[in-house]
Image (spheres, helix red, strand yellow):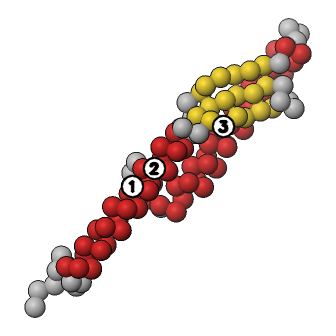
Amino acid sequence: MAKFGGFGGNPMQMQNLMRQAQKMQQEAMEAEEEINQTELVGSAGGDMVKVTIMGNKDVVSVKINPNVVDPDDVAMLEDLVVAAFGDAFRKADELRNEKMGRFGNLGGLM
């Protein structure tokens, strides 16, 4: 007797496997959409600089407390902005790992 699809399973097992794969793909797409719609805030300098991004790392806003603006120390402000972006991007990566990690490589196909 010929094996179905080279997997050695019967057609019902293959249908169940396909249903599970489709369900998982749908769940991955929903998780991806949730990530894309999640707003994350990174901050630095005790919240003196805040960066808001979406889960897909699109930048929404940058807020700088006027008290941190010192014309004689622009480098410090630049460092705070970089640190706030780093914090926001780290949070986006953590969110993606949390939401998509269970999908393995399937999540990377979205």
Depth check, mark 2 against mark 3: the one in front is 2
Residue labelled with disc 1: 26
Q: Are marks 1 and 2 in contact (CB under 8 Å)?
A: yes
The three-letter amino acid code for the residue at tag 2 is Glu
Position of 53 with respect to 83 (left or right) is: left
Q: Are marks 3 and 1 in contact (CB under 8 Å)?
A: no
Disc 1/disc 2 C-alpha distance (Å): 6 Å
For residue 17, which quarter of the picture? bottom left
Please tell me whether mark 2 sits on a helix, a strand or a loop.
Answer: helix
Residue labelled with disc 3: 40
Please count the marks in the image. 3
Position of 54 with respect to 80 (left or right) is: left
The three-letter amino acid code for the residue at tag 3 is Leu
- 95, 20: nearer the viewer: 20
Residue 2 visible, this orientation: yes
Please tell me whether mark 3 sits on a helix, a strand or a loop.
Answer: strand
Q: Residue at x 47, y 61 (%)?
A: 103
